Image: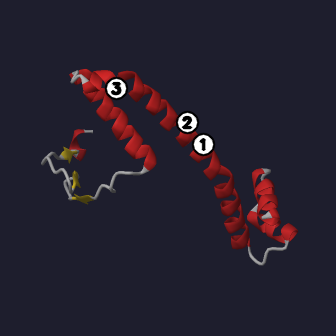
Amino acid sequence: MERQRQALELRLSGATLDVIAKELHFRHPSGVAYAVEAALKRTLEPAANEVRKIEIARLDRALLSIWRSVLNGHHGAIDRYLKISDRRARLLGLDAPVKLSGNITSDLTIKIVDEDEDDGTDATTDDNND
């Protein structure tokens, strides 16, 4: 872990992978790249988790402020609840992955389809209008 930290510090200071490999006695620059990536992940992942916890707490507060209105059937509050719930699900990764498929034809018609919700719409670009 110490060598990963050192590799990250050197990389952040502008050292190349080759220079770091020589200085820290890595066999190959690819080992330096792996060490830097691992150090970054270890550094950034806890910070991202903390931000996620803060956002969830904010969503909880927002939900608490409208919950009585939701229970009383106020449509605006129900709509807001659904938006809060959707945001929470995305933050926590609760939704199943969306399956997309697409194709590009020679006339630059692009169609992206959410396989769960195909509404039949096309996004079309005509190259000749430029």
Q: Give the number of the disc on residue 80.
A: none
Q: Earlier in the sequence, mark 1 or mark 3?
A: 1
Looking at the picture, which amino acid does disc 3 mark? Trp
Rendered-image quadrant of the C terminus: top left
Q: Residues within 10 Å of mark 2 (few under 14, many from 20)?
A: few
Which type of secondary structure does the marked residue at label 2 adopt? helix
Q: According to the image, what is the colour scheme of the structure?
A: secondary structure
- Residue 107 position, x and y percent, is 19, 54
| Residue closest to the far bottom | 27
Q: CA distance from mark 2 to mark 3?
A: 20 Å
Rendered-image quadrant of the N terminus: bottom right
Which residue occupies 71% across, 72% down?
Answer: 31
Q: Residues within 10 Å of mark 3 (few under 14, many from 20)?
A: some
- Residue 117 position, x and y percent, is 18, 50
Which residue is the site of mark 2? 54
From the viewer's side, name the closer residue of 18 and 44: 44
Looking at the picture, which amino acid does disc 2 mark? Ile
Q: CA distance from mark 2 to mark 1?
A: 6 Å
Using residue 120 as the reference point, say whether residue 1 is left or right of it: right
Question: Is 34 drawn above or below residue 89 in the view shown?
Answer: below
Which residue is the site of mark 1? 50
Looking at the picture, which amino acid does disc 1 mark? Glu
Q: Give the number of the disc on residue 67.
A: 3
